[in-house]
Image: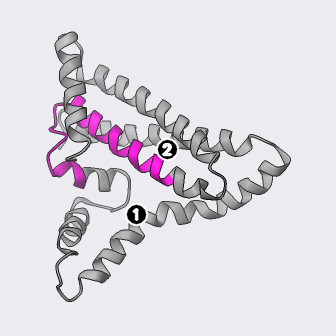
């Protein structure tokens, strides 16, 4: 939130200044298009990383998803630098099932550096939750690598389409949360 939030806030403020009649939904659509395209391009690029493709893709996806959520928050008038956006990000990306568990995980992560008994198991759990999407995709990556030997470019195409679709689904969840009348 500290690193990416100010950019999202500046983006929304700039568009509101330039297009004062633009609706929040219009800004949300712009952000969604931008980051769905970015997710597709990031997935395609990551697929070219060879053995490191799953790690490269995970990094690209996490970065793009964070940017997408923060830009949508800004589009709908929420402060993208507020700590609540970290909670939103964990819930919207389905790392945590609800706000309460996301708040608890963030509190645990903040205190994980303290030499308090039990802090390392919480840090390990947080790391596992973040890596869960990667482990779920590992089998798919192995199968895709085998298919890619027969069909060159299949991995690039599958990664681009899959990551773009995941970003689009995330955008729909975020808009449902940030649209006025909600949270």
User: Which residue corresponds to mark 1?
Assistant: 130
Residue 179 seen from this side: no
Asked if residue 20 is positioned above or below residue 112 in the image, the reply reads above
Q: Secondary structure at mark 1?
A: helix
Relative side of 169 to 84, left or right: right
Q: Tell me if 161 is positioned left or right of 1 in this view.
A: right
Please tell me which residue is depicted at 30% across the width and 75% down the height of the picture.
Answer: 123
- Label 1 crowd bin: few (<14), some (14–19), many (20+), radius 10 Å: some
- Colour pattern: one colour
Residue 166's tag is 2
- List x then y, in percent, for residue 87: 23, 55
Q: In this picture, which residue range is highlighted in magenta?
A: 58-87
- List the single residue furthest toward the bottom: 117
Pick the residue in front: 10 or 164: 10
Looking at the rendering, in which quadrant would you find the C terminus? Answer: top left
Q: Residue at x 34, y 45 (%)?
A: 66
Q: Is residue 66 above or below residue 36?
A: below
Residues at marks 1 and 2 touching, judged by CB atoms closer than 8 Å: no
Image quadrant in which you'd find residue 117: bottom left
Question: Neighbour class for label 2 at 10 Å: few (<14), some, many (≥20)?
Answer: some
Tell me where residue 153 appears, x and y as whole percent: 74, 40
| Picture mark count | 2
* Left-right relation of 143 to 129: right
């Amino acid at each position: 939130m500290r690193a990416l939030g100010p950019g999202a806030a500046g983006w929304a403020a700039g568009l509101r200044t330039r297009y004062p009649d633009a609706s929040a939904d219009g800004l949300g659509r712009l952000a969604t298009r931008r980051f769905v395209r970015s997710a597709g391009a990031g997935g395609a690029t990551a697929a070219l990383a060879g053995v490191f493709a799953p790690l490269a893709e995970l990094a690209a996806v996490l970065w793009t998803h964070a940017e997408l959520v923060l830009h949508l928050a800004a589009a709908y008038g929420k402060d993208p630098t507020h700590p609540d956006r970290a909670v939103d990000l964990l819930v919207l990306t389905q790392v945590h099932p609800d706000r309460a568990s996301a708040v608890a995980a963030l509190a645990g992560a903040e205190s994980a550096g303290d030499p308090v008994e039990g802090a390392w198991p919480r840090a390990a759990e947080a790391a596992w939750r973040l890596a869960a999407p990667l482990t779920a995709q590992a089998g798919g990556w192995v199968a895709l690598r085998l298919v890619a030997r027969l069909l060159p470019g299949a991995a690039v195409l599958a990664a681009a389409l899959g990551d773009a679709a995941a970003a689009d689904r995330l955008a729909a969840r975020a808009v449902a949360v940030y649209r006025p009348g909600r949270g």
